Amino acid sequence: MSTATQAGPAAPAGPAHPLAHRRPLGDRGFQLLALASGLLVLVILVLIAVSTSQQASSWFSTEGLKIFTNNWNPAAGQYGALAFIYGTIITAIIAVVIAVPVSVGIALLLTEVVPYRWARPIVYVVDLLAVVPSVVWGLWGILVFAPWIQHIYASIASGVTGIPVLGALFGPPTSGASFFTAGIILAFMITPIVTSLSREVIATVPAIDKEGAYALGATRLEMIRGAVWPHSQGGVVGAVLLGLGRAMGETIAAALVIGSSATITSHLFAPGYNMPAVIANQFGEASGVFRAALMGLGVLLFVITIIVNVVARGVVARSARRKRGD
Amino acid sequence: MHLRRRRQVTAVGVAAVATALSLAACSSSSSSPAAGGGSSSTPAGGSPAAGGAKLNGTLNGSGSTFQLTFQQAAISAFKSVQSGMTVNYGGGGSGKGRTDLASGTVQYAGSDSTIPDKEKANFNGKTVLYFPVLIGPISVAYNLSGVSNLKLTPDVIAEIFQGKITNWDNSAIKSINSGVNIPSTPITIAVRADSSGTTQNFSLFLEKAAPSTWKLGSSSTISWPSTARAGNGNGGVAQIVKTTPGAIGYVDYADAKATGLSSAQVKNKDGNYVAPSTQSATAAASGVTVSPNLTFHAVWASGAQAYPITYQSWVLVYETQSSSNTAKLLQAYIGYLLGDGQQLLPQLGYAPLPSSLDTSAKAQLSKIGM
């Protein structure tokens, strides 16, 4: 066995070879394959962005900045998309506002409060929520949930009419299929992601910090606030942002329960529309500038979700660096 | 020796994967979408009733979902006529069907409307033949307890669907329905969330029948008033009407009947109030002016018993086919749709073509060729 080969750590023992400083063929082949796969993903992403933008270019050139007006009337050739951008943001915010306290609460519960033996089945059940297909959420939402919650909306709305801020938010008109219902369904869908990511982040808090807090006489809540939260806040914020990105892009569930009404209104119980829903609903019969407009909405959605995901990763990375003390 | 063997295996593996990938890329790009597929026809023998030889091959179609139920029933019935032929119909909407025909993905398309001007360029100047295959009424379905024979005029319908009449006991509705006890319920309008040929023809009817009242244009996507409740598909609208007291919506007659909804009688061009049915739809199509290329609008047709909100659907094919086998396959299948297939229509909730229109369409079959 020759020990003279000083190639990289992958160099196998074996008969000495004059070109032993080169990587063996298997390694090189694998390296190329892995590189090609990675590049392929990047190429596909760029191609998607470029080709959809090309298809949408006639919308951008025809409408210019008017795409940011609330004037969606395909029959008259007007494609102002502000109502959909508004709807996407509102439903995503509602989903996050509902899902985050619940998810972080469940995560804290599972790591700090519940004994390990009970934690595992609960984790399993929460993860099952993620397995439910999107279209099933939408069908359940429109056939079961929306008719049931319509009565609750109506009673809340009649209760708050006249009150300044609450009346504007929760007053009539109400409909089972509305911004708020879409927000609730989206919250159900993003809870598993946010919960499992938060749980993993919170579980990495060193036990020594927690023990130290207890040793200093902290109650459980003070320990969570003082020892767990500073460590995990970056990761949890990152998880929330990933959930936000998912809520923005969720299509079929939103399309079925959002009410399909392109209006900008502060009333959360009124029917609305968002970008993925209008694309799914109106793509079949669209042509020409109409189709370009729908593709342009897709491009906008793509850009927004990329930005949200990049910010999420940045926040997570920055808090990880800060935690390491860089 | 062990090492060299491992290197050989790895090299072979990498080469195999690379070959597989390149083969997959090559084969998908070299498949010919425009060809009719299948082997050449065997001229001898065969007993099929569709006039002539036993044919083999595959036909693909897509487009109008209005036709979808009919196409599915016809395809399975056609199997017993020409067992060697496979026909597929994908639905997806009239717009998709026309796009697929233009790009050569399918050999025939179902469309509820003629090719709009802005799409004509996609067909590169090639002639497209229109074969009308069915007629269907659009029902104005309503949910009003105690009222069974509601009458409506086009102007009143236009005002209701623009949100101008908001309560059932409005004077305009009551004056048409004198003697009927109409409760004072708020009106909820139910419309389509998705783009559709049904919306297109319903709005076209309102544009033609109530031109001074209807302001929202005619298109497969209309921007309805914000108070409208939207449902997906005819089934979605039917469900909204069924579960909401005081609701009114436009639904394909077949779905209205299947859901058990009451349909309003609509005043037609001759001044009579007619309910949607197979007979009143065929009557509407008989009273219509048909262009030489077999295009027409069945909405707002004249005829004493014509139902004014009736629409039609065509099968579109290229006049010039790339292979004679495809031409024969198309002639056989479309000939079936126009012949024995028409008998399938009434039980599916459509109306068959009037006989003069059917004859003209059959005569056009011979134009499909090379």
Image (spheres, helix red, strand yellow):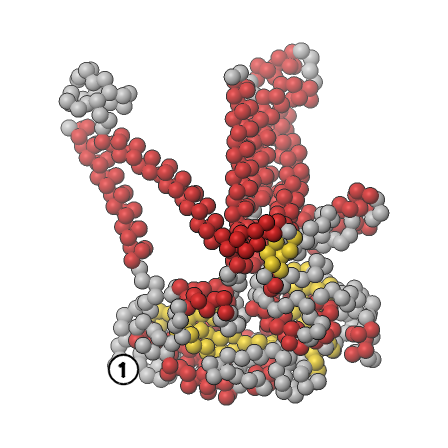
Q: Residues within 10 Å of mark 1 (few under 14, many from 20)?
A: few
Residue at point 56%, 31% (across, down) = A238
Residue A236 against residue A250 in the figure, above or below:
above
The x and y percentages for residue B205 are 63, 74
Image quadrant containing the N terminus of chain A: top left
| Quarter of the view holding residue A233 | top right
The x and y percentages for residue B111 are 50, 71
Nearer-the-camera pick, B44 or A21: A21
Residue at the far right: name it.
A162
Residue at point 69%, 12% (across, down) = A217
The x and y percentages for residue B259 are 64, 69
| Quarter of the view holding residue A76 | bottom right
State the count of labels: 1
Residue type, mark 1 in image: Gly
Residue at the far top: name it.
A216
Residue at point 65%, 73% (across, down) = B207
| Quarter of the view holding residue A120 | top right
Residue A186 against residue B239 in the figure, above or below:
above
Nearer-the-camera pick, A322 or B332: A322
Chain to which mark 1 belongs: B
The x and y percentages for residue B338 are 45, 81
| Left or right, A21 with reference to A218 | left
| Left or right, B340 with reference to A156 | left
Residue A178 appears in the picture as rendered: no
Residue B304 appears in the picture as rendered: yes
- Disc 1 marks which residue? B45
Nearer-the-camera pick, A15 or B107: B107
